[in-house]
Amino acid sequence: MIISPNRSDFSTILNILGRLILGLSAFMLIPLAVAIIRKETSPFFDFFISFLIAASIGFILLILFPLKKEVGWIHAFFAVSMGWLVSSLLGAIPLFLSGHFISFVDAWFEAMSGFATTGLILIQDLDHLSFSHNMWRHLTMFIGGQGIILASLSVLTRARPVAVGFYYGEARQEKILPNVIDTARFIWKVCFIYLILGVCVFSAILYSKGLPVDKSLFHAFWLFFAAFDTGGFAPQAQNIAYYHSLTLEMATVTFMILGAMNFNLHFWIWMKSRREIFKNFEIKTFLCTFFSLQALLYFSLKGMGHFSIFRKGFYQLISAHTGCGFSNLGMGELSQFHPLALISITLAMMIGGGVCATTGGIKLMRLGIIFRTFFMEIKRWMMPFKSVYKERFHHLQELILSDKRIKEAYIFFTLFLVTYIGGAIIGMIYGYQPVMALFESVSATANVGLSVGITAPTMPLALKLVYIFQMWAGRLEFISIFVSLGFILTLFKK
């Protein structure tokens, strides 16, 4: 039986949103502190006003809408889908106040891109953006990569028994520890350990390249947020090409790969067995898809020369496959790639990284299952009629390729594919070439951030809204959104 919502349900959901907004307002204190340290007067008031707005809305929701019901899965899923929209809208306020955006929709696009760890940008004059606003842009990726809802609610809500609903609602498929709150804390622990390591490595490289100590440190934080959380934002308009450093590019590749790995795999490597990385199904799938696409890319770029293919082609491909979106190319250079090269990068973006990671896309696990299913059916046809065959694969332990896993893989594959193609068709309606339109649609839906030039402040308003929806839906992987829509539609059946 489908649950029909009532006032108590919506009061509970709005109470959860109030807690979420309060958590988000607390994160705004970080760029506020940066504005004080850097003596940035105007940005200080941008964040002070934004903090007051967010905190006020949060407190009002808590006062007016108490928890009237025990929080259930339906509340969790609805709060997740609405929470990401509300967070991006509130997160857009300080960006819009900065004066670097033509309209509020552009600032909302940027905020959604940050929280969804996408990296597509509509900001103008990025090179002269304040330190505090840049901190906020990159902090949204750090928050979104680990999960907006769990970041706030694991501390602020009493509804810990149903935290699993928030966890799965934010497109996490696997728990690491039996308790979801402990799982969330482990994920944050991993992130902070890598944060210390990443900041040390990046700041050392940047300082050796001639950047002042303070600028090296800030840029190191921002580059780590963008690399490990596979976000793709950068503090300069030229992205990674600004630094002209092969060493930095290789360092970012390392953290991109770490961010695209399943957090469960991090746990096993840290706590149980380092040999898991050599046996893991997702890692094997990644190696197969990456080197196959690298071969395709090599043949399409062979006129460039071996070093250029490695530095430009390899970097774009690994950035696409991990869902990061960093680029070491000049302005407009990616759009000049051979169509076959763009197709190989598009396929890498479509796939993405591991489940329970900061990356988006179809995910390695699902693609691997689809391929295994294909070969399993061939083997079955080759066997005697009455024989029973079960395919196995290794992901942390030996698993059977069950019908449930196969069905889930095909459902998500279909949902992503339809969204990829749907966005491409809308882009083509606005006059963009098919390959370019598909590239940009996939980049938005798979939360990558690489662009062939379609994403710009001058693009049609409707296309901006389409990409905002794709970033939102792709990050949450559709299910919590569908549940929320079903929840709302039941109101009209009363």
Image (spheres, helix red, strand yellow):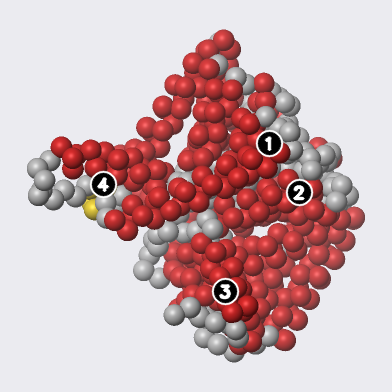
Query: Mark 1 or 3 closer to N-term?
Result: 1
Query: What separation in Å lies between label 4 and label 2 (alpha carbons)?
Result: 44 Å
Q: Determine which residue is flagged by label 3.
A: 487
Residue 245 found in image quarter: top right
Q: Is residue 437 left or right of residue 34?
A: left
Quarter of the figure that contains the N terminus: bottom left
Q: Earlier in the sequence, mark 4 or mark 2?
A: 4
Write down the residue under mark 2. Answer: 462
Upstream in sequence: badge 2 or badge 3: 2
Q: Position of residue 54 (x, y in %)?
A: 76, 70
Residue that carries the numbered disc 4 in the rendered image: 393
Position of 159 compared to 10: left or right? left
**Residue at left offset 73%, top offset 33%:** 431
Distance CA(mark 1)–CA(mark 4): 40 Å
Lateral position of residue 475 relative to residue 381, left or right: right
Answer above or below: position of 182 versus 42.
Answer: below
Q: Residue 428 bears which disc, if any?
A: 1
- Camera-near label (1 vs 3) is 1
Nearest the eye: 100 or 130:
100
- Tell me what residue is drawn at x 68 percent, y 42 percent: 426
The CA span between labels 1 and 2 is: 13 Å
The residue closer to the viewer here, 53 or 456, is: 456
- Single out the mark in the foreground, 4 or 2: 2
- Among the two numbered marks 1 and 2 on one chain, the one whose residue lies closer to the N terminus: 1
- The three-letter amino acid code for the residue at tag 3 is Phe
**Residue type, label 2:** Ala
Spatial CA distance of label 2 from label 3 is 26 Å
Q: Label 4: few (<14), some or many (≥20) within 10 Å? A: some
